[in-house]
Image (tube, coloured by chain):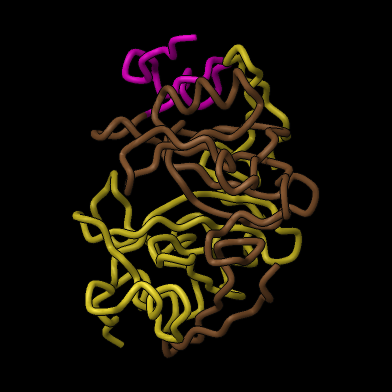
Chain colours: A yellow, B brown
Amino acid sequence: MPFPDPASLSKTELETGSRLAPKFDANGLIVVMTVHADTGEALMVAYMNAEALQRTLATGEAHYWSRSRQELWHKGATSGQVQKLVELRVDCDQDAILLRVMPQGDGGCCHVGYRSCFYRSASTDGTLTTIDTKL
Amino acid sequence: MPFPDPASLSKTELETGSRLAPKFDANGLIVVMTVHADTGEALMVAYMNAEALQRTLATGEAHYWSRSRQELWHKGATSGQVQKLVELRVDCDQDAILLRVMPQGDGGCCHVGYRSCFYRSASTDGTLTTIDTKL
């Protein structure tokens, strides 16, 4: 499934149309926020290229583009933390994706060992406090 | 409050330390996912530069960097959709921020008129369906 070029769409078509026309950036990537489908908990932020987005829709499992490894990343392929896709949404100007997923395996998503990558809260002076316990 | 240079920290310090050391990208920006503090609903994805992050922490209201307007953006300054900060979190490698906010004004966040920018859901063939009603 090739995606339409968002530059070929009007602002109205982009914002209120019925075609997924993701705006990939200069590196061919779009940002993705991933949340737990049941609890809504924010799990992680990652990136997709067109292939990762297509594979996510086709397989029903989250695929990202690993910027550090510069390769397609089937989340959980090695860790077991596969993310079953429940719903994929796009934002108003189609430059961000929201994934609602059911984490598999141990239910985590973060390589540090927490359920969510957002396990630290900042106070106003920039001090971080860990607010979760490891799985 | 100047932020420490994340490049000066070890991976362990970055991931498990107690200092907010945001990794700004080549454009001086860090991605932010913003969610409703009460419901957890995913509201929007935006970007902050160091000044926006500092102002958010100092004022308790979300500030972003508008990439389209290339200016500091006090969310809600014109729309009334101010976002009161409840909690700011950082992810494992400190290249993404999570804001938990209480939307003010009409309770919305999206310029198109929805409560969340993620008002469309994609089917596997790339068809979008609007899943929310306007405020």
Magenta residues (range):
B1-23
- Who's the residue at 45% across and 33% down the image? B93
Q: Is residue B118 above or below residue A3?
A: above
- Left or right of B133 in this view: A57: left
- Left or right of B84 in this view: B110: left
Secondary structure mostly seen in the magenta stretch = loop
- Left or right of B6 in this view: A7: left
- Residue extending farthest to the front is B78
Q: Is residue B14 magenta?
A: yes
* Along the viewing direction, whichever of B2 and B67 lies nearer the viewer: B67
Residue A81 in the image, given as x and y percentages of width and height: 56, 58
Q: Quadrant of the C terminus of chain B?
A: bottom right
- Who's the residue at 70% across and 46% down the image? B103
Q: Is residue A100 magenta?
A: no
Q: Is residue B1 above or below residue B17?
A: above
- Left or right of A26 in this view: A50: right
- Who's the residue at 45% across and 86% down the image? A18
* Along the viewing direction, whichever of B84 and B11 lies nearer the viewer: B84
